[in-house]
Image (cartoon, rainbow, N blue to C red):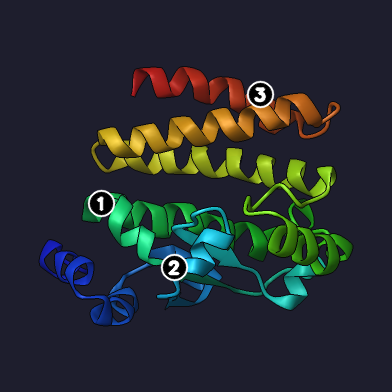
Amino acid sequence: MVTDVEYRRAVAEPAFRQDFLGMVDFGPMRRYVRKVLYEPDEMESVRLGLAEMVIVPSLPARFHIRGTRSKIIAYPLAFYNCHNLRYFLSSLIDHEGYHAKDYYECPERIAWPIDIFFTHWFFSRILSNEKYDGWSVPIKVRKAAAEIRRIKHELNKAKQNGGLDTNQRRHLEFDLRKYGSYLLENSNGDFPEEQALRSELFSELMII
């Protein structure tokens, strides 16, 4: 497992970041992750709505074929915004790793092939700086539900590892309000489990 010293070196030395990512022990999540890449192009992060890390599912997963691993891309902002090693590893393993698990086990809950190849590429990349603004409503709802499941997983892991620090708590609260509100307003009764989980998470964040 990586150390605080190695993390601080990765923060200070961009040339070391790919090596650092290769040293991370994903534990049980490794089976869902094909590789982890560092992308130094900050403009790519800006085009994706100031992304810190993103999950890139395989082509078969986009067509709802289970059992394929995803790629994770980390951008410079991940090393600027995460503040400490525990937060960084939670973002990488418990957040993006959980999305990789979702795509491996149940891609039909997330991906929609037609929109993946047209709506996402055309609108999100060409017309909008916001990662989600160009997607059709059905895909946005699927993604919002996936984020609610991911937040629950992150909270569970944080409780196992000593709780949330202040910055991680703020980040999760922001995500919960963003995705929870979208799911509430646009799901039309779909994803009842995630709707119930949304309410549970608001209570849970208040007591952790």
Who's the residue at 59% across and 43% down the image?
147
The answer to whether residue 198 is left or right of residue 171 is right
Amino acid found under the numbered disc labelled 2:
Glu
Res 1 visible: no
Nearer to me, 188 or 126: 126
User: Mark 3 to mark 1: distance in Å?
Assistant: 29 Å
Q: Nearer the viewer, mark 1 or mark 2?
A: 2
Q: Nearer the viewer, mark 3 or mark 2?
A: 2
Nearer to me, 3 or 9: 9
Determine contact: label 3, label 1, CB under 8 Å: no
State the residue position of label 3.
Answer: 196
> Where, quadrant-wise, is the C terminus in this rendering?
top left
State the residue position of label 1.
Answer: 86
In the displayed structure, would residue 164 be above or below residue 184? below
Q: Which residue in the rendered view is the most extreme toward the right? A: 114
The answer to whether residue 8 is left or right of residue 150 is left
Secondary structure type for disc 2: helix
Q: Which mark is residue 109?
A: none
x%, y% of residue 119?
83, 60
State the residue position of label 2.
Answer: 42
Res 35 visible: yes
Amino acid found under the numbered disc labelled 1:
Arg
Amino acid found under the numbered disc labelled 3:
Ala
Give the class, few, some or many, for how many residues have Cα within 10 Å of label 3's Cα (few <14, many ≥20): few
x%, y% of residue 155?
42, 37
